[in-house]
Image (tube, coloured by chain):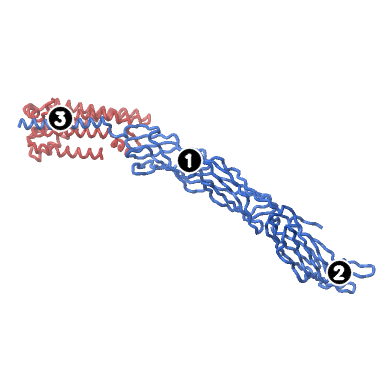
Amino acid sequence: MTLNYPFPGTVAVLLLLAICAVPAAGDTDVRPTVALNYQVEPAVLMPGDSGTVTISLNNMATGEIYVREDNKTFDMNAYILSATLGGNSNIDILDSSYTNVGLMGPGDTLELTFNIKAKEDMHNSVHFLNFELVGGSDMYDLNYKIPVKVDGRDLKLIVSNLPSTVMNEIATITLDVVNTRANDVNSVIVTSVGDGVIFTPSEVFVGTITAGNRSTATFTLDTMVASSGVKDVSFSASYFNGDNLHSSAEMSTTINVVEQSSLLLTAIEIEDVGSKYSITGDINNVGTTDAKNVMVSVVESDDIEPIQPYANYFIGTLEADDFSSFELSARVSGDITSIPVLIEFRNTDNAYTSITESIDLGSNSIIGAGSSDGMSPIVIGVIVISAIAIIGIIGYSWKKRKESA
Amino acid sequence: MLEVLTNPDSFFEKKMSEDISFKMPIVIILVIGVIGAINAISMTQKIMAELPSDAAQFAQYGAIFGAIGAIIGVFFMWVIYAVVFYAISLAFKGKGELKRVLEFVGYGFIPSIASGVIGLIMMTIALPTIEFSLENPELMQESMMSNPMIQASAIVGIIFMIWSANIWIFGLMHSRNLSIKNAVLTVGIPIGLYIVSTSYKFLG
């Protein structure tokens, strides 16, 4: 007799309700035998879960319904008068007994399903439910204990690469969802929540996680517009154990956001020729993910006009921890002290992102300064004095002509 | 010589009684040419700095040719001015030799010496700030035209050109025996057009 426990498999229990023997006196009783299998769904319940116990009865007799033996005729049908599953203080049986079930012919199989419910406050353990089968005619009764395991273990969420400090950047967060239970769970969905930060997507469908295994959910953490400070982030998972919906314990943590762009402009040199500014420098990716389709442009306004050949400068993909040079040109009028530069790129999710940086005309290295200030007062004075003098001389020459005329 | 600047009417009246002499006008034009040559050499040196080293040695010859060209160009300009004034005065039935017109137009270039010197000083100040981009000549030209020093030099040139025009009016009046009104028109039309086109080019 082999008991394949805990899997809801086959447990063959041969009950000899009748012993085919030939007594010395010549009397033989032939009785039908019944094999019993059971399946508990879900395989392992959690406290409060509903489930089913399905008992499968199989009439092991083969051949004819009526067997003739020693001038006697025996009926090989298995008569089942009633089948009852009894609960205990921790597990309720939600269905009444099966009565007047009927008979099973030789080789027939009958499945009886009972709804069960584990109590909310029960402890982890294996509970035995009493199965009572009352037979009729030549069939003996059957009593059996069916084990039902209750285990309250939850899914565990583990974040392996959440940085403690981030800048205004895009980061990839990987979350491991571990099934510590002894049975599979299905329809697992992981949800992320951030205070002042954005997770994309907000939910990830993981699917079925087999017992003792893990799956991975990947999120993109967007702190591009987050203000500086400590932010709360949390992760949780919902899943089904059988038909029972559960939520895992929330995994909460914090991250510190530093208000610093992940794309930095350095080594800025400004060359001004008249009212035209030529800006050269380096753009550095100090974030943790690559920036794709990077382009820098001068922001146009009433006083600032981007001019060719470098109204905008395309850089392409800027990998993390890499840099590239760029050049921009703009014409400036009025009292402008800084030039706004727009940095556009796509993050790892191909979402469009932009940052505006300001290049200060005063503090950066300027070559050829001075010519953009317009005519100096001295030059204007020279022009005015020359004009006055020449007009005076011309006037004097015409006056002399009139006098001589 | 000062009289031609302050009382050109009396100066040219006296000159009409003398023989035609190109001695002084040639000296005046030569001085202007030398100033122009110095300017051309400064510009060439700036361009040489932008060239690759193997091309730079050929640019030295360019400087020499530029200087010679500046001197010849001024003489050429003197002749052109005289011919244009003579041609326009024909419409007003002017009477007088072209050679006399040429002589008197030469004297009218004296103010250009002063404007040339002032322009040279301003160009020397402005040159380091000009973007000499051989790959983008439009940027180079725009850079020059928008430079305040270059613009000031143009304004000074226009002012002194008006002074020269005043001298040429009296020169044409006497050399071509024109009325003052016709002399003003003879000089005023071409010089006025020149001033308008220069103003538009530099000052927008």
To which residue does mark 3 refer?
B106
Give the vertical position of A181 relative to B200 (above or below).
below
Residue type at mark 2 is Val
**Secondary structure type for disc 3:** helix
Q: Is residue B22 left or right of residue A125?
A: left
Number of the front mark, 2 or 3: 2
The location of residue A317, given as percent across then percent down, is: 48, 43
Give the vertical position of A178 relative to B1 (above or below).
below
Q: Is residue A336 left or right of residue B189?
A: right
> Chain B in the picture: what colour?
red
Q: Which chain does the numbered disc 1 sit on?
A: A
Task: Report which quarter residue A74 is drawn in.
Answer: bottom right
To which residue does mark 2 refer?
A30
Of residue B79 and residue A215, the one placed in the foreground of this image is A215
Give the vertical position of A365 relative to A17 (above or below).
above
Of residue B35 and residue A165, the one placed in the foreground of this image is A165
Of residue A175 and residue A228, the one placed in the foreground of this image is A228
Mark 2 and mark 3 residues within 8 Å of each other at the beta carbon = no
To which residue does mark 1 refer?
A261
Quadrant (top left/top right/bottom left/bottom right) for the C terminus of chain B: top left
Mark found first going from the N terminus, 1 or 2: 2
Q: Which chain does the numbered disc 2 sit on?
A: A
> Chain A in the picture: what colour?
blue
